[in-house]
């Protein structure tokens, strides 16, 4: 069994820890986090081994960045790249309940929790996170670091940009797109293209001023 280190002491890390333990996918040897108060603490039986930069010292273990924010995951991966950590060092964690046919692709560093569905010719980039019961329909194309809350549903041929965030139970109409670093609020119904960097909420979804947007905001951890 391959060794695995989870980066970040977060709710997502605890979910991944429970998943890989129950499935026997990896042997989680510990976690890394920059919070100095967490050093030496045990989280669900796994020790906090040090800071994120210490990942460079564990050359025989795979890594998995467990921050809920795509922007935060991107920043950590960039930081680790500057320390000489290659993309091949990242694990992919997929719950055993997730079934996907030949022709679907899941990039390194991605996390797919229970009952995620991929139908046909779905492409997920690297470091994508999909919470439970997300549905990717035929020909969906998802860029690196995108994040999907529980229950998100994409129609066929949807394009989701880099580090975009789709809140819990939101849905996206077929053949539309969500741009890079865009945010879709919880329960929103996206019927037209969401431009890069914008925040959309509601049914049908529409742009909202990000300074007043709080409901369904992308999590930081």
Image (cartoon, grey):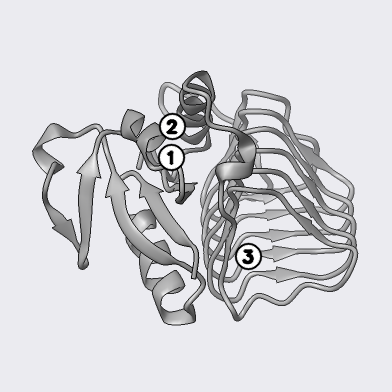
| Percent coordinates x, y for residue 110 in the rendering | 60, 52
Read off the residue under disc 3: 134
Q: Nearer the viewer, mark 1 or mark 2?
A: 1
Q: Give left or right: position of 184 versus 176.
A: left
- The answer to whether marks 1 and 2 mark residues whose Cβ atoms lie closer than 8 Å is yes
Q: Give residue 208's quadrant in the image.
A: top right
Along the polypeptide, which appears first: circle 2 or circle 3? Answer: 3
The location of residue 7, given as percent across then percent down, is: 37, 44
The residue beneath circle 2 is 213
Q: Residues within 10 Å of mark 2 (few under 14, many from 20)?
A: few
Residue at image point 42% right, 63% down: 16
At horizontal 69% and vertical 47% (from top left) the residue drawn is: 204
Mark 2–mark 3 CB contact (< 8 Å):
no
Evaluate if marks 1 and 3 touch, with contact meaning CB atoms under 8 Å apart.
no
Q: Residue furthest front?
A: 60
**Residue 9 visible in image:** no
Q: Secondary structure at mark 1?
A: loop
Rendered image quadrant of residue 15: bottom left
Which type of secondary structure does the marked residue at label 2 adopt? loop
Visible in this render: residue 101?
yes
Q: Residue 64 versus residue 125: which sits nearer the camera?
A: 64
Q: How far apart are labels 1 and 2 at the CA level?
A: 7 Å
Q: Which residue is mark 1?
A: 217
Q: Residues within 10 Å of mark 1 (few under 14, many from 20)?
A: some
Q: Nearer the viewer, residue 174 or 149?
A: 149
How packed mark 3 is, by other alpha carbons closer than 10 Å (few <14, some 14-19, many 20 or more), is many
């Amino acid at each position: 069994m391959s060794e695995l280190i989870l980066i970040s002491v977060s709710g997502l890390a605890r979910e991944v820890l429970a998943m890989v333990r129950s499935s026997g996918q990896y042997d989680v040897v510990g976690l890394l986090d920059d919070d100095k108060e967490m050093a030496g603490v045990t989280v669900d039986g796994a020790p906090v081994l040090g800071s994120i930069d210490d990942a460079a010292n564990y050359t025989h273990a795979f890594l998995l960045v467990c921050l809920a924010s795509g922007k935060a995951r991107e920043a950590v991966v960039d930081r680790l790249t500057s320390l000489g950590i290659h993309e091949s060092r990242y694990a992919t964690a997929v719950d055993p309940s997730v079934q996907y046919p030949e022709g679907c692709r899941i990039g390194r560093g991605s996390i797919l929790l229970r009952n995620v569905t991929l139908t046909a010719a779905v492409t997920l980039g690297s470091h994508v996170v999909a919470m439970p019961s997300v549905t990717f329909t035929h020909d969906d194309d998802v860029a690196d670091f995108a994040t999907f809350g529980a229950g998100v549903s994409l129609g066929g041929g949807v394009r989701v940009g880099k580090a975009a965030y789709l809140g819990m139970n939101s849905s996206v109409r077929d053949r539309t797109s969500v741009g890079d670093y865009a945010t879709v609020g919880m329960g929103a119904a996206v019927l037209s293209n969401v431009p890069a960097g914008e925040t959309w909420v509601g049914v049908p979804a529409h742009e909202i001023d990000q300074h007043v947007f709080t409901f369904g905001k992308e999590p930081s951890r």
